[in-house]
Amino acid sequence: MNWTKNKPPTAEISYYDHTTCESPLGQFTIEWKSWKDEPSYDIKLGDEWLNVAYTLDEAKDVCRKYLEDKAEELNEFIRDEEI
């Protein structure tokens, strides 16, 4: 997955520090309050909040897992339709 470099708050994307990644399902955004000693990392796909993580790497892993799970759901759907 190709994540942007960490960006400062941008009104159009996030009012917090953030990074984004385009995917076939839409844009993932991970945002955090960088002024906190131990920030949490909120994960969104488009406008939908998905989850929270406690490190940036963990948040990126959550996004990858989300895509893998959706791919598996689609594969199962296609297999079921072929029967």
Image (cartoon, rainbow, N blue to C red):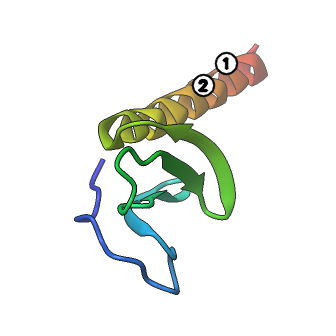
Q: Are marks 2 and 1 in contact (CB under 8 Å)?
A: yes
Which residue sits furthest bottom? 11
Label 1: few (<14), some (14–19) or many (≥20) C-alpha neighbours in 10 Å: few
Residue 17 percent coordinates (x, y): 38, 67
Q: Please, what secondary structure does the residue beneath circle 1 have? A: helix
Q: Please, what secondary structure does the residue beneath circle 2 have? A: helix
The answer to whether residue 25 shows anywhere in this view is no
Position of 13 with respect to 46 (left or right) is left
Write the residue at 75% across / 17% down: 80
Write the residue at 42% across / 48% down: 39
The answer to whether residue 31 shows anywhere in this view is yes
Q: Is residue 7 above or below residue 21?
A: below
Residue 31 percent coordinates (x, y): 46, 59
**Pointer 2 residue:** 75
Compare residues 47 and 2 and report the one nearer the observer: 47
Residue 33 percent coordinates (x, y): 44, 61
Position of 41 with respect to 26 (left or right) is left
Say the numbered circle drawn on residue 79.
Answer: 1
Q: Image quarter for residue 50? A: top right
- The amino acid on which the numbered mark 2 sits, given as a three-letter code, is Asn
